[in-house]
Image (spheres, helix red, strand yellow):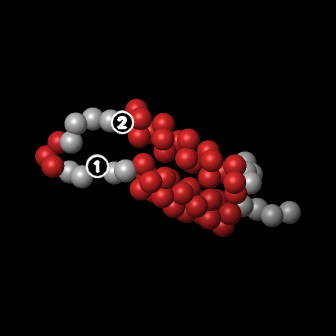
Amino acid sequence: MFYTLEYGYEWLRVLAVNFASTHRTENPRGFSEVGENKQLLIAIVVTSFFNNINNLFQVHN
């Protein structure tokens, strides 16, 4: 799949917000909660990593 950069980040933002809204639980054992901005950053970094790995193994004709 190919997404433009703007569309890709919008999609990641929606994923991060959706994840944050569906995974709200009490804070067990004093662990700090991860904010939505940090979740978005994590999603961008992980997606970029897997896109780079995918590009390494893609066969170009």
Mark 1: amino acid: Glu
Q: How many marks?
A: 2
How far apart are the alpha carbons under marks 1 and 2?
Answer: 11 Å
Which quarter of the picture shows residue 59?
Answer: bottom right
Q: Residue at x 57, y 48 (%)?
A: 12
Q: Please provide percent x and percent y for residue 47.
A: 56, 56
Q: Please provide percent x and percent y for residue 43.
A: 50, 53
**In this picture, residue 20 sits left or right of residue 11:** left
Relative height, residue 6 to residue 20 (above, below): below
Label 2: state its secondary structure: loop
Front residue of this view, candidates 46 and 35: 35
Q: Residue at x 62, y 52 (%)?
A: 9
Mark 2: amino acid: His
Which quarter of the picture shows residue 27?
Answer: top left
**In this picture, residue 54 sits left or right of residue 31:** right
Tag 2 residue: 23
Tag 1 residue: 33
Q: Residue furthest right?
A: 61
Q: Earlier in the sequence, mark 1 or mark 2?
A: 2
Residue 37 visible, this orientation: yes
Judge the density around disc 2: few (<14), some (14-19), many (≥20) Cα neighbours within 10 Å: few
Q: Residue furthest top?
A: 22
Relative height, residue 27 to residue 4 (above, below): above
